[in-house]
Structure formats: C-alpha cells, structure tokens
Image (cartoon, rainbow, N blue to C red):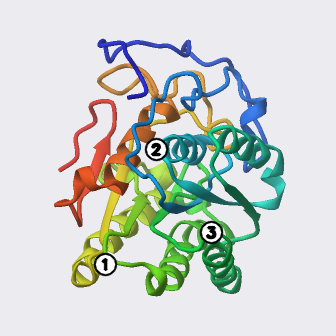
Amino acid sequence: MARTSEDPRRKDVPQPFPEQHQAPPGHEKDMQPRPDYGEATYRGSGKLEGKKALITGGDSGIGRAVALAFAREGADVAIAYLPEEEDDARETARIVEAQKRRCLAIAGDIRDPQHCRALVTRVVKELGAIDVLVNNAGYQMTHQSFVEMKPEEIDRVFRTNVYAMFYLTQAAVPHMKPGATIVNSASIQAYQPKPYLLHYASSKAAIVAFTKGLSQELAEKGIRVNAVAPGPVWTPLIPSTMDVEHFGESTSLKRAAQPAEMAPIYVLLACQDSSYVTGMVYGATGGQLLP
C-alpha cells in the first residue's frame, strides 16, 4: 500500500496550504507543497502484470499517481493530456519508465471525438491492447454564483468530463476482452454538490449514472465498470481554480488527500481482487458520507 501510518488524520504534506494561484490547467511542478503521488512509498505486487492501460489526465495529480501504481503492478501505460501539460507529462513518463514499463505519452484534446478515436487506435497499435481504461481527466472552475457560469465554460466542463468519457469508452470497448475494466473518476460533488461548482458537480453526477448504466451492458461482455468518488485531493486543478489555504479542512479527517492515497483504489478496481464488483462507486472522501 502507499502508506504505513495508521492515523488517518496525519498530514504528511503540511497544511494549511500557502496562498497560491496558477492559470488553468495548472502544473504540478509549480505547486507548493508538491503533491505526493507515491514515488517513494507505493509498492506493487504484480496485480496488473502484462496489462495495458490508458489513463486520461495522466500527466499529474490522481492520473500520475495511478500511472505510477499501475506500472509498479506490472502494466504498460498510455497517458493522455493537453499539450500545455507537456512538462508534467514528461515527468509521469519518466517515473513509469523507471519501473521498466512502457509509457506512451499522447498529447491532444479529448473534447474532440476524432482525437479520442485516434488515441485509442494508437494505444491498441503500439501497446497491443487496452485492458484498463481510466477516464480521469477533468475540468472545473469556481464562481460566487452559478449564474456567473458562462455557456462556453459549462460546455468545456461537460465536453471534458462527460463527452470525452463517452467518446473514449465507445472507441475502446470494441477492443476490450473479457476481464477488462473501466474505472471512471467521479467526485463527492456528485452527492454533495456545491453551488460554486455546480457545472462540475453536475458532470460528476453524470459520470455516476454512466458508470452504473454501462456496467449493466458490459457485464454481458465480461467487462467491469466502476468509479471512484474522491473528496478533496491536492492536485494542480486546485490552485488553478480556487482558494487553497484551507482546502480539505472541512472533512472529518480535517485535511486534503494526496494523490498517492487514491491510486490503490484504482488498482483495486482495475485488478482481479475486485472480480465481483461492477457498477459501484467507491468513495474516498475523508469522511464525507455518500448516500
């Protein structure tokens, strides 16, 4: 596992966070303090040996932590990211390749259905398969009121968080064999929506519905579909979209999570340890309750 401490209230990364702001989409290398994605702590045990995984938003945050964990579990990895995230993507590729696993780093905009199809085609061609699809890329912005949310911003949230998930999954499923898995990144916001994040929260609720509905169809093909619903996690999305000083302190555990704390859950849902689990949403919220 990623940690050895038994006290869940621990703050291995000090809080409160210092005041900071970045332009979207944000860069992990510019965050203070830097997030913990598990490089020094995650230990693999072959749970994904020989598997091929595609992770969107794999350049940083939860996506980077998942890419590292998958590699240490024996998987080759493809990461999808925006061109402006190239520096972070190179770092993710470095840590995956340091595990003696392949890493395809593919830049582009997953809001474009043509790019999504080309992305899947390239992964299948170069890695030979897609055994695990992680729909993780996300976009958010915060506002004082939902009436301030402009049409183009609402459109970007849904095209990134929801439409891309449809495009990629539709492209990937015909290449997936029995035993393959899909893991989607939902959010506590799907269940406890905040008005200042209402377009994001609504998109995450759509991901929950997508996960539950798709799982019923793909069960007949032997493909499992699940989701993770994180609470507050210290990723580049945060300093690029909101005030950070007290981020996560309203949870029961009084702190934000680190990406390294999310990765083992994605491993669990991607591997055969969860072979009887499909259509489920796994909450990792610091004590914020899911219904």
Residue at the (55%, 71%) spot, across then down: 158
Q: Amino acid at mark 1?
A: Leu
Q: Earlier in the sequence, mark 3 or mark 2?
A: 2
Is residue 74 depicted above or below 257 in this figure? below
Residue matched to label 1: 214
How far across and how far down the image is residue 160, in percent?
Answer: 60, 68
The quadrant in which the N terminus is found is top left
Would you say the residues marked 1 and 3 are in contact, meaning their CB atoms lie under 8 Å apart? no
Does dot 2 land on a helix, a strand or a loop? loop
Q: Amino acid at mark 2?
A: Glu
Does dot 1 land on a helix, a strand or a loop? helix
State how far apart marks 1 and 3 are (Cα).
Answer: 25 Å
Is residue 231 depicted above or below 248 in this figure? below
Residue at the (36%, 51%) spot, across then down: 228
State how far apart marks 3 and 2 are (Cα).
Answer: 16 Å
Instruction: Work out whether residue 14 or residue 5 is closer to the camera in this orientation and state it.
Output: 5
Instruction: Work out whether residue 132 or residue 125 is closer to the camera in this orientation and state it.
Output: 125
Is residue 132 depicted above or below 291 in this figure? below
Residue at the (41%, 48%) spot, across then down: 194
Does dot 3 land on a helix, a strand or a loop? helix
Between label 1 and label 3, give the one nearer the viewer: 3
Residue matched to label 3: 127
Q: Could you say which disc has been placed on residue 145 in the image?
A: none
How far across and how far down the image is residue 276, in percent?
Answer: 16, 61
Q: Earlier in the sequence, mark 1 or mark 3?
A: 3
Q: Amino acid at mark 3?
A: Leu
Residue matched to label 2: 73
How far across and how far down the image is residue 192, in percent?
Answer: 32, 48
State how far apart marks 1 and 2 are (Cα).
Answer: 26 Å
